[in-house]
Each structure stands twice: as structure tokens, then as C-alpha cells.
Image (cartoon, rainbow, N blue to C red):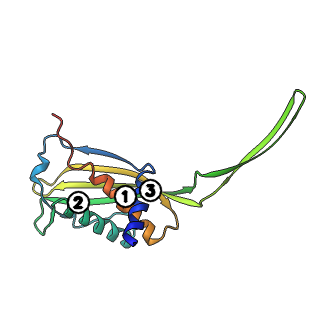
Amino acid sequence: MKFLSIFMLSLFLVSCGATVAVDYDKQIDFSKYNSYNYFPTIDSGLNELDDNRIIQITDSLLQQRGFVKSETPQLYINFFARESVSRSRNTIGIGIGSGGGNVGVGVSGGIPIGGRVVNQQLTMDFIDVEKDDLVWQAVVDGEMKERATPQQKEAYYTAIIRKILSKYPPSSKK
């Protein structure tokens, strides 16, 4: 039941507009990569709990696709985030109006609902270990509640990492 609720929340969050931009080296044959590990010194800008969530989710999704986590990897994965907090853009509108004859007067306003949100830009880099070159990068913009529960954070990261990895490997349109 817990899995179903996380899956449904993930599905909802994916449909809520997190956008992914991808850049990669066109000269690389991505089919040769099948092992990975994390960059030795990740400085993500997130707390340790969120780092661990991202690592666990990425491990799970990559291993489902046949990748092997190795001490001698072909790819290093690095990730980092930039965050800002803003008011929710959701509002309830209230209006008062009056009119008579040829004269009309109106007053309206919006009351913010939903509290503050964290706008996050998460960048994930895939680095060729042998060449020490960046070969693939994804940047995703998303948002979550400022006071999200651990379950909401897990669902959020599952949704955006799933979206990121859906773009890897890049399609070979030559």
C-alpha cells in the first residue's frame, strides 16, 4: 500500500511540470557504459538525508536498467542542486463589484494558499572515468513544499530522477 501511494504521488508530481534539459557529447557511444559509481566528493548543496534519497533512488532505477554499481566504474555520477524559496503561486481570488447606470466599480485580490515552496534545479552529471570528461548532463527544474514530509520528498525525488533517467542514454539520431 505504501508503494502504491508513493507511486501515485510520483505520478502526480511528474505530471506537474518538472522540466528536464539534457546535453551530451555526440561523439560518445553510450552503449559501452554499464557500470557506475558516485563521484568521490559530491557537494550537492542538499542535506545528507536528501543526498541519500537521491543515491538510493538512482541506484534502484539504474540497476533496474542493467547497470552495475562498481568500485571500478566506467561512469561517475555527480549531482548538485540550487534552491530558492518562494510563495506558492496558487491563490484564491476574492472580488467585490458594483455597477449602476454607466458607472462600474470593482475591487479584487488574491489570497495565497499552500504555503511556501522550494524551487529546485537539480543537475546530474555522468562523467567518463577513463577520460575524466563530462559526457552527459541533465538539469531538471521542479518544486516541492517547503515543509515536505520524508514521504513527499521521496516521491518528489523518485519522480524527477525517473524523468532524468528517461532521457539516458540519448537517442542516436545521426
Q: Identify residue for label 1.
A: 159
Res 12 label? 3
| Left/right of residue 16 with respect to residue 158 in the rendered view | right
Query: Counting residues from the N terminus, which is met first, the one under dot 2 or under dot 1?
Result: 2
Above or below 35: residue 31: above
Residue at the image position 29 percent from the left and 55 percent from the top: 124
> Given the current orientation, which residue lies at the most extreme right position?
101
Name the quarter where the N terminus is drawn. bottom left
Mark 3 surroundings: few (<14), some (14-19) or many (≥20) residues within 10 A: some
Q: Quadrant of residue 152?
A: bottom left
Q: Identify residue for label 2.
A: 77
Q: Position of residue 127 (x, y in %)?
A: 19, 55
Mark 2 surroundings: few (<14), some (14-19) or many (≥20) residues within 10 A: many
Q: Position of residue 51 (x, y in %)?
A: 34, 68
Q: Quadrant of residue 5?
A: bottom left
* Cα–Cα span, label 3 and label 2: 27 Å
Res 45 label? none
Name the quarter where the C terminus is drawn. top left
- Amino acid beneath label 3: Phe
- Amino acid beneath label 2: Ile
> Given the current orientation, which residue lies at the most extreme front position?
1
Above or below 64: residue 96: above
Q: Quadrant of residue 52?
A: bottom left
* Cα–Cα span, label 3 and label 1: 9 Å
Under circle 2, the secondary element is strand
Under circle 1, the secondary element is helix
Residue at the image position 63 percent from the left and 57 percent from the top: 113
